[in-house]
Image (cartoon, rainbow, N blue to C red):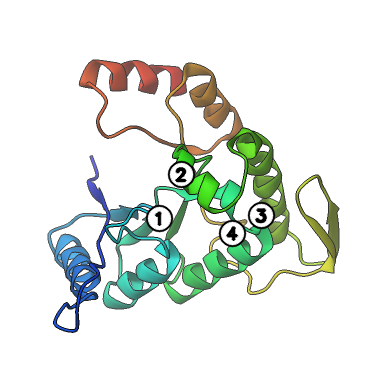
Amino acid sequence: MKFGIFGSAQAKRGGPDTDSGAGFRDFVELNVEAEALGFVSSFLVEHHFTGFGQVSATLNLLTWVGARTTTLRLGTAVIVLPWHNPVLLAEQAATIDLLSGGRLDFGIGKGYRHNEFAGFCIPMEESDGRFEEALEVIVKAWTSDAPWSHRGKYWQFDNVVVEPPTAQKPHPPFWMGAGHPESIARVAERGHHLLLDQFAPIEQTGERIAIFK
């Protein structure tokens, strides 16, 4: 059995005497200690507009963690695909995968907080479509050496080669957040790893794992 950690960090606002970076630095040190204790992975959230400084630039913070560790796998739980330009995201994620020596676990999801979608001026009802299209583009970006184009509903790209390449081949492992039985079944069909709700009762977690298997 392998153990990892999941969490977040806070950058508090305040006056000139407030050390806004302390929470981020403490999180990095927590990960360094976790690796020393034998934990194999660390998964980090993405949230926006919370008012209390939750992590928004997930890959940036994980890059710092990666620089301070050597074996700890660096996971996102989750990057909300509907909010991101998929080519830019593919480039940023590939960069951390290269710098860390192939330690990125790319956890993705559709999002669930209405205020975050509203803040980005993205209708929440577009979440499913944006997620599927972004995932298609990211896979293409990570597995194509020749120039390619994409003409979708939400994004268009012409004759691009996405750089840098990833360290892990054909790409970093995908992890997908899911809780509904149909969503869990789709994760299994794709051959991706499953991220579950950390607050669910143990019985419900067992039922969801059974569906995934």
Question: Which residue is denoted by mark 1 in the rendering?
Answer: 49
Q: Amino acid at mark 2?
A: Asn
* Quadrant in the picture for residue 144: bottom right
Dot placed on the residue nearer the N-terminal end, 2 or 3? 2
Along the polypeptide, which appears first: circle 2 or circle 1? 1
Task: Characterize the local packing of mark 1: few (<14), some (14-19) or many (20 or more) Cα atoms within 10 angstroms.
Answer: few
Q: Residues within 10 Å of mark 2 (few under 14, many from 20)?
A: few
Is mark 2 in CB contact (under 8 Å) with mark 4?
no
What whole-number distance in Å separates the C-alpha atoms at marks 2 and 1? Answer: 8 Å
Q: Are marks 1 and 4 in contact (CB under 8 Å)?
A: no
Residue holding disc 2: 115
**Residue 115, horizontal then vertical, whole percent:** 46, 44
The residue at 17%/69% (across/down) is 26
Q: Is residue 53 above or below residue 181?
A: below
Which of the two discs, 1 and 3, labels the residue nearer the N terminus?
Answer: 1
Q: Which residue lies at the image location 34% right of the left edge and 54% below the top edge?
A: 44
The residue carrying mark 3 is 138
Q: Residue 123, position in %: x, y?
A: 62, 40
Cα distance between the residues tagged 3 and 4: 14 Å
In the image shown, does 85 or 37 lie closer to the viewer?
85
The one of 135 and 33 positioned closer to us in this rendering? 135
Task: Report the residue marked by disc 4.
Answer: 169
* Marks 2 and 1 in Cβ contact (< 8 Å): yes
Amino acid type, mark 3: Ile
